[in-house]
Amino acid sequence: VVFGDNTNDIKMFRPEWTSIAMGNAVEELKKIADFVTKDADDGGIEHACRHFGWID
């Protein structure tokens, strides 16, 4: 699993990994993400983890 928000994270968004863009991410990253979560300042990582059932 990888989380990202800017163009420097594009190289991490590989097909073999679940790629999650933060809600405040650049559009270029959101377009290639498997999932777009809430903003980083709005609990985005926790929201994504709950969405995928990784935490309760």
Image (spheres, rainbow, N blue to C red):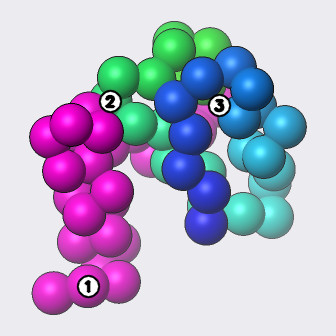
| Crowd tier of the residue under label 1, counting other residues whose Cα lies within 10 Å: few below 14, some 14–19, many 20 or above | few
| Tag 2 near tag 1, CB within 8 Å | no
Q: Which residue appears at 32% of the width and 70% of the height?
A: 49
Position in image of residue 12 (x %, y %): 78, 46
Q: Return the x and y of residue 35 as percentages of the image width and height.
A: 45, 46
Question: Which residue type carries mark 2?
Answer: Gly
What residue would you read off at disc 1?
55
- Residue at left offset 15%, top offset 87%: 56
In terms of sequence position, does the residue under pointer 2 or pointer 3 come before the other?
2
Residue 15, quarter of picture: bottom right
Pointer 1 or 3: first along the chain: 3
Residue 33, image quadrant: top right
Distance from Cα at disc 1 to Cα at disc 3? 24 Å
Residue name at image x 80 percent, y 64 percent: 16
Number of numbered markers = 3
The image's mark for residue 19 is none
Q: Is residue 9 left or right of residue 31?
A: right
Q: Is residue 36 left or right of residue 42?
A: right
Q: Bin the neighbour count of mark 2 within 10 Å (Cα to Cα): few under 14, some 14-19, many 20 and up.
A: some
- Magenta span covers which residues? 32-56
- Could you tell me which secondary element the residue under label 2 belongs to? loop
Mark 1 or mark 3: which is in front?
Answer: 1
Q: Which residue is mark 3?
A: 32
User: Decide: marks 2, 3 in contact (CB < 8 A)?
Assistant: no
x, y percent for residue 39: 26, 33
Mark yes or no: residue 25 visible. Answer: yes
Q: Residue at x 48, y 38 (%)?
A: 21
Give me the C-alpha separation between circle 2 and circle 1.
20 Å
Query: Badge 2 is on which residue?
Result: 23
